[in-house]
Image: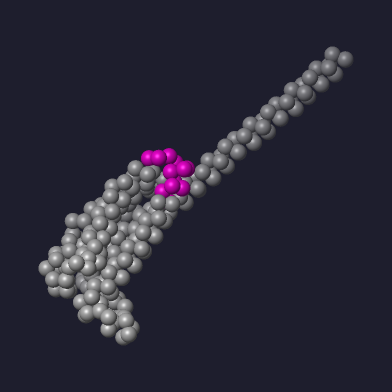
Amino acid sequence: MPFAENLAVVKDIVVVLGTLTTMSLGLYGLKVWKRDLVGKETYAVIRNVIKQLHKVSKAAGRARRKVHLHEHVRMAPEEAKHFTANEQWRLAEAAVYSARLDDLGASIAALDDSILEARILLGSSIHATTLVFHGAVREAIGRVNDYLDLLHDQHLSLAEDSPAIQSAQQAMYPSDDFGDELSLRIADARESAEIALLRYLHRRDIRGTVLKPNAAKAELEKWKRMTPHRRGD
């Protein structure tokens, strides 16, 4: 009997230990699963933030560019007869820039949504990484709005070659290679935000490792020689 009792106790202990081991493995597996799930979700939301940063940056550049004549929508003859040539030009010019600001506004809204998703998952510090970028983009919007205010001012008799128009355009237009001060600030702010977010994408370098630095520089110079007419990003 003592042997049988001892055997029963041993069996009970083995069963309990087995149950505890199973529970421990289950809890560990759940913890790993949650960690992997959060990691994948973090990667996805940060990836989206960085993508939207680039979209806003490009939209801000487009918003400030010079309007080409083919972008102007011509008035119907019955409508055009009520406006002078200068008035038609001002209305057509304003319509293009207003549409560009609408596109930029949509891009900013998408960026803000992506930042909110990341902030919910990772904390308010995510929002702080983009503050300087938002400020630089707001300045670009301000310059376009200054030009629009001038175009819409019915108290001023302005033509395309008026000094006030040319001055506002000069303040708004980016340089051909986007090397002007405001374009550089927008690009630098975007890159700073991206660098701050890189750790969530398991990368250390903003340029990646597809090409080594010297090779990447050589390819960039080759591209510039082949496409001298293209504007920068």
Q: At 17% across and 74% down in the image, what residue appears?
A: 160
Where residue 153 sits: x, y (%)? 22, 66
- Does the magenta portion include 210? no
Q: Quadrant of the C terminus?
A: bottom left
Q: Residue furthest right?
A: 1
Using the image as rendered, state which of residue 69 and residue 92 is in the foreground: 92
Where residue 193 sits: x, y (%)? 32, 48
Q: Quadrant of the N terminus?
A: top right
Magenta region: 114-125
Q: Is 162 placed left or right of 20 in the picture?
A: left
Q: Main secondary structure of the magenta part?
A: helix
Q: At 41% across and 48% down in the image, what residue appears?
A: 115
Quarter of the image holding residue 19? top right
Q: Is residue 83 visible?
A: yes
Q: Residue furthest bottom?
A: 77
Q: At 18% across and 56% down in the image, what residue appears?
A: 181
